[in-house]
């Protein structure tokens, strides 16, 4: 226990300030100001890997590390779409995941924000559209914000998530 | 492998790891596999290709590995009606590979188990994407299949379906548990959700462009895949890589290993109820990724390893920073290891949990660090070291217990060993160019690349087409061999220990589903 406390004290607080929202990532403005004001920054996110290479997931995980400290901003990842305000979706959407993604979207209560993550989520990326993939997330469910990058950095992800909230 | 007893002629196969190729008849295929098994060999990969355009029917390829290196058995099937013998009777790992080979090429195995594996109704079941005459139709809507899971009957037995959308930030896959109370009687995996047609996509790219796609087969192993791909291409071109590029590749591969082990060690602590571990290790992982970006311009090191060498040199001021970081990381990892080792609650969760014995590991063909955690001491970096590993004398990390605790211990050992290797590489970084473009490659060459990634050996089999195109590229992830072992590792454990056991292996979905 002493070792744990010593390590915590030695590490100190490494959390950094959150970046400003990146308004240019917003592709649709579906939500009214009033709703966004109520949501504020107490946001519950359900992440859906709809067929990615796992690179985007690694960077989404990084949001939880002490540097980005996403929970310190009032944002948390939840286990069920029924508890979520936002879906954070990586792609390309494989045909085998299309039904699961649509069902996840349907299970999310209104108002639901959708952030498409990564070059593949935004455009289909290197995989494109094929016999096995439907390409970009917007081909399957409506998208509010697109965060490009292969994969996007945690900072870009935060900017995109905050852009979906800020109006 | 010595194929002389079979009376088969073997030829050398261009490969990063010593390899031979042998044409075999249907009967020889099964005797060769049996002989390989008796000689201590393992199945690495099995795939099929459509060569009807060259009037050679279909070609089934079976890649085996033993202490002598790789052996590629090549069996020609004259037409789509021809079948080949079930190799799962010798190597159980062949089962899913055979089913996947049918899903993609229609080449059928003479096995009882004819269930699809990668196919989940995204395309008509009688069309085969890797056939040369395959044409996708935009009219095909994703359908739903009714997969015949094996059910356990009896008083009090119930079923828990999990996925494909998981509760955490995880890749998609489906797990079907049969349980009594909290005890797992049986787990059946259903994968293929992340299938995005990677092998077909390769065939629309040039040989040089293929490296970028290889680096996106599994994002956590981007360096390993890009290197395996480059190795295959360079073997085909009979090109050698500048010494500085080889050193930079190893540097990237070891940093990838460190980053993945650090991340997983954090989550293993977290899944054992010790959130402190996640906070600490995820901080260290972030330090590694940030310095990756400073040194090479990319946090996960994507597109750094390219055919011919490295896409860029290391930033000049990053060498010193990396050395400083290595020293700091070693110190911190040792402190955290002591904390993990002394934490009674954590050790209670880790020890005896998710046990895999050495015998089972060998029977099922377990590979990578998970195999090293149950006494199977294989590591390509030590067994068949490509430059610069031939001068690094990699120390294999092994344990014999085969439980979560052993996999944690191996990950700690490998992290520290990788940090040592990084220091050695940085201390003797050769001068010179970082890239030498490979010479033009003739059509219809076949070559292999195989690299010990953090999870285990990743293998690329590359075949050239005319005009520097890719005719066929098969990628084989260690997860193909390890996923079935996970089904065994959870038997008799309680459901809440599944996340811990699963994370201790941390297998790839994308790398498997292709």
Image (cartoon, grey):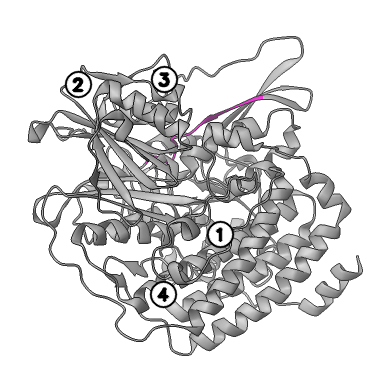
- Mark 2 secondary-structure assignment: loop
Q: Disc 2 or 3, which lies upstream in sequence?
A: 2
Residue closest to the eye, B31 or A9: B31
Check if mark 2's residue and mark 1's residue have beta carbons within 8 Å: no
Q: Disc 4 or 3, which lies upstream in sequence?
A: 3
* Pointer 1 chain: A
Please give left or right for residue B483 compared with residue A82 in the image.
left
Q: Is residue A37 visible?
A: no
Q: Is B506 colored magenta in this rendering?
A: no
Residue pictured at 36% horizontal, 79% vertical: B244
Residue pictured at 30% horizontal, 76% vertical: B242
- Mark 1 secondary-structure assignment: helix
Give the quadrant of the N terminus of chain B. Answer: top left
Check if mark 1's residue and mark 4's residue have beta carbons within 8 Å: no
* Pointer 3 chain: B
Q: Position of residue B358 (x, y in %)?
A: 63, 38
* Pointer 2 chain: B
Mark 2 vs mark 1, foreground winner is: 2
**Mark 2 neighbour class, 10 Å CA radius: few under 14, some 14 to 19, many 20 or more:** some
**Mark 3 neighbour class, 10 Å CA radius: few under 14, some 14 to 19, many 20 or more:** some
- Residue A60, which numbered label? 1
The residue wearing badge 3 is: B115
Q: Which residues are magenta?
A: B186-195
- CA gap between label 2 and label 3 equals 18 Å
Please give left or right for residue B68 compared with residue B183 in the image.
left
The residue wearing badge 2 is: B80
């Amino acid at each position: 226990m002493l070792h744990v406390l010593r390590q915590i004290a030695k590490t100190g607080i490494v959390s950094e300030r959150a970046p400003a929202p990146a308004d240019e990532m917003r592709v649709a403005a579906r939500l009214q100001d009033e709703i966004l004001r109520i949501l504020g920054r107490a946001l519950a996110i359900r992440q859906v890997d709809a067929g990615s290479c796992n690179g985007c997931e690694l960077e989404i995980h990084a949001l939880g590390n002490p540097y980005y400290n996403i929970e310190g901003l009032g944002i948390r990842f939840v286990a069920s779409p029924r508890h979520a305000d936002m879906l954070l979706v990586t792609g390309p959407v494989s045909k085998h995941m299309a039904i699961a993604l649509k069902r996840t979207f349907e299970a999310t209560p209104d108002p639901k924000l959708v952030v498409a993550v990564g070059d593949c989520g935004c455009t289909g990326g290197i995989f494109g559209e094929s016999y096995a993939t439907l390409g970009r997330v917007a081909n399957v469910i409506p998208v509010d914000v697109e965060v490009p990058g292969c994969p996007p950095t945690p900072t870009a992800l935060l900017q995109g998530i905050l852009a979906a909230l800020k109006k | 492998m010595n194929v002389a007893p079979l009376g088969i002629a073997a030829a050398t196969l261009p490969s990063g790891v010593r390899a031979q190729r042998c044409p075999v008849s249907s009967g020889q295929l099964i005797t060769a596999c049996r002989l390989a098994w008796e000689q201590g060999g393992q199945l690495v990969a099995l795939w099929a290709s459509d060569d009807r355009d060259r009037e050679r029917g279909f070609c089934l390829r079976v890649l085996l590995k033993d202490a002598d290196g790789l052996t590629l058995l090549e069996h020609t099937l004259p037409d789509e009606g021809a079948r080949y013998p079930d190799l799962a009777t010798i190597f159980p790992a062949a089962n899913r590979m055979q089913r996947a080979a049918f899903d993609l090429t229609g080449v059928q195995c003479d096995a009882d188990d004819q269930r699809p594996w990668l196919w989940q109704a995204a395309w008509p079941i009688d069309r085969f994407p890797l056939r040369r005459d395959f044409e996708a139709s935009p009219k095909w809507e994703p359908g739903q299949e009714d997969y015949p899971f094996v059910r356990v009957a009896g008083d009090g037995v119930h079923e828990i379906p999990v996925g494909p959308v998981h509760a955490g930030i995880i890749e998609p896959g489906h797990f079907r548990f049969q349980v009594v109370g909290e005890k797992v009687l049986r787990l059946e995996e259903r994968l293929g959700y992340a299938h995005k047609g990677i092998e077909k996509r390769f065939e629309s790219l040039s040989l040089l462009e293929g490296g970028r796609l290889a680096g996106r087969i599994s994002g956590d192993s981007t360096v390993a895949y890009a290197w395996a791909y480059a190795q295959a291409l360079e073997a085909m071109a009979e090109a050698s890589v500048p010494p500085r590029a080889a050193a930079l590749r190893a540097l990237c591969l070891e940093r990838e290993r460190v980053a993945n082990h650090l991340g997983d060690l954090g989550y293993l602590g977290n899944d054992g109820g010790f959130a402190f571990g996640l906070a600490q290790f995820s901080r260290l992982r972030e330090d590694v990724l940030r310095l990756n970006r400073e040194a090479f311009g990319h946090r996960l090191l994507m597109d750094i390893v390219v055919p011919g060498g490295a896409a860029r040199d290391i930033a000049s001021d990053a060498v010193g920073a990396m050395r400083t970081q290595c020293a700091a990381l070693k110190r911190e990892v040792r402190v955290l290891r002591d904390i993990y080792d002394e934490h009674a609650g954590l050790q209670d969760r880790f020890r005896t949990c998710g046990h895999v014995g050495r015998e089972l590991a060998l029977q099922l063909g377990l590979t990578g660090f998970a195999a090293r955690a149950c006494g199977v001491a294989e590591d390509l970096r030590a067994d068949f070291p490509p430059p610069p590993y031939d001068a690094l004398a990699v120390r294999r990390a092994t344990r014999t217990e085969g439980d979560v605790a052993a996999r944690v211990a191996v990950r700690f050992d490998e992290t520290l060993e990788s940090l040592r290797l990084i220091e050695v590489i940085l201390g003797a970084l050769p001068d010179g160019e970082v890239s030498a473009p490979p010479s033009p490659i003739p059509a219809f060459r076949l070559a292999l690349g195989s690299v010990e990634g953090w999870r285990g050996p990743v293998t690329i089999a590359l075949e050239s087409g005319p005009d520097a195109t890719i005719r066929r590229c098969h990628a084989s992830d260690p997860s193909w061999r390890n996923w079935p072992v996970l089904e065994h590792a959870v038997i008799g454990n309680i459901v809440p220990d599944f996340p811990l056991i699963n994370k201790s292996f941390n297998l790839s979905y994308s790398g498997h589903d292709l």
